[in-house]
Image: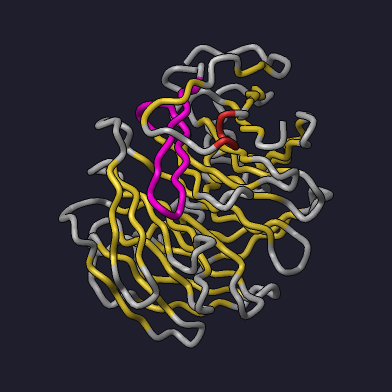
Amino acid sequence: MRPIRALPLLMLTSLLAVGAAAPSAPDRIRGKEYRIPTPASRPVGITAGPDGNVWFTEYSANKIGRISIGGVFTEFAVPTARNSFPSGITAGPDGALWFAESSCSFNKIGRVTTGGVFTEFPIPTACAAPHDIVAGPDGALWFTEGFMNQIGRVTTGGVFTEFPVPTAGSYPWDIAVGPDGALWFTEVSANQIGRVTTGGIFTEFLIPTPNSQPYGIAAGPDGALWFTEESFNKIGRMTTGGVFTEFVISNESSHPQGIAAGPDGALWFVEYDSSRVGRITTGGTITEYTLPSHGSHPVGITAGPDGNVWFTEMYGNKIGRISLRG
């Protein structure tokens, strides 16, 4: 890929709403894109930091990035020299950022302070391939181990516990804290949503649509879990008791991935193949917004510390922002 010269922030002048009619808030949406200084860094995970900034992972550049709400970047090189492939990232209970190093070779959970000081913790199981990570209700960090079919837990002091997922070959992917104090995760290959208590007790729920390939998952403001169905272009909702509802995205080639609860009481998700950001109300009304950068392939999304929605554009090499506050 040809290197792209770093540019100042770009105005998203063509955020175009398509699909179902939306409430008044999305009609006022404006957006911006910010090009990451390192070319071809391929940002993936993204989260609001404890310092009022937005933090993200640079999968191919082997860096952790930080962007201020005004669009100023700082990048920190991961100590593992190359190819650690940082993916998921979350704000930890200790005021630092925690991230998964998904490389089978290096296989670590990383921690970085807001000042850029790193600590890395090797996962006991070889080639666990951690993907996503979240701060648990018990003061520890919880993460998915796709290759080894486990859910991992690590304390802020670096002590690990690993729990095998009951269904073999399920490939756990994303993970979130549920409204019931348990950890909920997607099982891409098993077509299930999994639940594990902080004590390691599992329950699994089969998604009604076969082979839907669930990817992202988030707790909604309605006390339910919301997730993306990558293969069948749907957004799923399930209660903590296992009752499912599925909503079809109008674009048949959207392939939704990341999803997050927004600051406006709705859920926001990214459409990897159609280069769109979607919004779904808890009642199931979907609105989609087309990004000006065709082929940018958005992957991760989060509510920012500024009351807006932020997301990563993996192949556009940008961080995007949708402004809900004008």
Residue 285 inside the magenta-drawn segment: yes
- Residue shown at 61%/48% (left/top)? 264
Residue 45 inside the magenta-drawn segment: no
Query: Toward which corner of the image does residue 270 lie, by quadrant?
Result: top left
Q: Is residue 107 visible?
A: yes
Image position, residue 155 (x, y; %): 64, 76
The residue range painted magenta reads 272-291
Q: Is residue 84 visible?
A: no
Q: Quadrant of the C terminus?
A: top right
Left/right of residue 273 with respect to residue 55 in the rendered view: left
Q: Nearer the viewer, residue 93 or 154?
A: 93
- Residue shown at 47%/16% (left/top)? 1
Q: Nearer the viewer, residue 319 or 113?
A: 319
In the rendered view, would you say 107 is above or below 247? below
Image position, residue 31 (x, y; %): 63, 26
Left/right of residue 245 with respect to residue 33 in the rendered view: left
Left/right of residue 200 with respect to residue 325 in the rendered view: left
- Residue shown at 28%/64% (left/top)? 244
